Image (tube, rainbow, N blue to C red):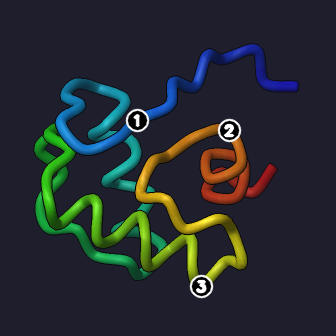
C-alpha cells in the first residue's frame, strides 16, 4: 500500500494530480499532449484509450483501478 491519496479525476479537473496522470499516459504511449495539468478532451481521449487497451472499464475518469494500472500496482 502506497499511502498516497489518488483522487478520481475526470474532464474539467485541474492541478498537480492531472499533470501526473498526463505524464503517466504519455509515458505509456497514450499521448495526451503536453502535461499542462488540465484534464481536457485530449486527456479524456487518452484515458479512454488506455482503459480500453488495459481491459478496464472505459469511462474516461481516472479512478482507483486506472491509477493502480498506470502505476503498475
The answer to whether the residues at label 1 and label 2 have Cβ atoms under 8 Å apart is no
The answer to whether the residues at label 2 and label 3 have Cβ atoms under 8 Å apart is no
Please give the name of the residue rendered at 19% of the width and 28% of the height, measured from the top-left corner.
Answer: 14
Residue for badge 1: 9
Q: Earlier in the sequence, mark 1 or mark 3?
A: 1
The CA distance from mark 1 to mark 3 is 19 Å
Disc 1 secondary structure class: loop
The CA distance from mark 2 to mark 3 is 17 Å
- Left or right of 58? Residue 13 is left
Q: Earlier in the sequence, mark 1 or mark 2?
A: 1
**Residue 48: % across, % down:** 43, 70
Q: Earlier in the sequence, mark 2 or mark 3?
A: 3
- Left or right of 13? Residue 68 is right
Disc 2 secondary structure class: helix
Residue for badge 3: 53
Please give the name of the residue rendered at 50% of the width and 74% of the height, measured from the top-left corner.
Answer: 50
Residue for badge 2: 64
- Please determine whether, in this image, residue 50 is positioned above or below residue 41: below
Q: Which residue, as the protein is rendered here, is positioned at the far right?
A: 1
The answer to whether the residues at label 1 and label 3 have Cβ atoms under 8 Å apart is no
Please give the name of the residue rendered at 34% of the width and 54% of the height, measured from the top-left corner.
Answer: 23
**Residue 37: % across, % down:** 18, 37
Disc 3 secondary structure class: helix
Neighbour tally class for label 2: few under 14, some 14-19, many 20 plus, Cα within 10 Å? some
- Please determine whether, in this image, residue 2 is positioned above or below residue 46: above
Neighbour tally class for label 1: few under 14, some 14-19, many 20 plus, Cα within 10 Å? some
**Residue 73: % across, % down:** 81, 49
Q: Quadrant of the N terminus?
A: top right
Amino acid at each position: 500500500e502506497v499511502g498516497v491519496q489518488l483522487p478520481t479525476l475526470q474532464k474539467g479537473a485541474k492541478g498537480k494530480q492531472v499533470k501526473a496522470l498526463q505524464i503517466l499516459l504519455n509515458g505509456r504511449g497514450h499521448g495526451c499532449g503536453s502535461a499542462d495539468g488540465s484534464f481536457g478532451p485530449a486527456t479524456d481521449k487518452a484515458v479512454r484509450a488506455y482503459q480500453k487497451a488495459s481491459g478496464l472499464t472505459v469511462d474516461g475518469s481516472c479512478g482507483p483501478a486506472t491509477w493502480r494500472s498506470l502505476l503498475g500496482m
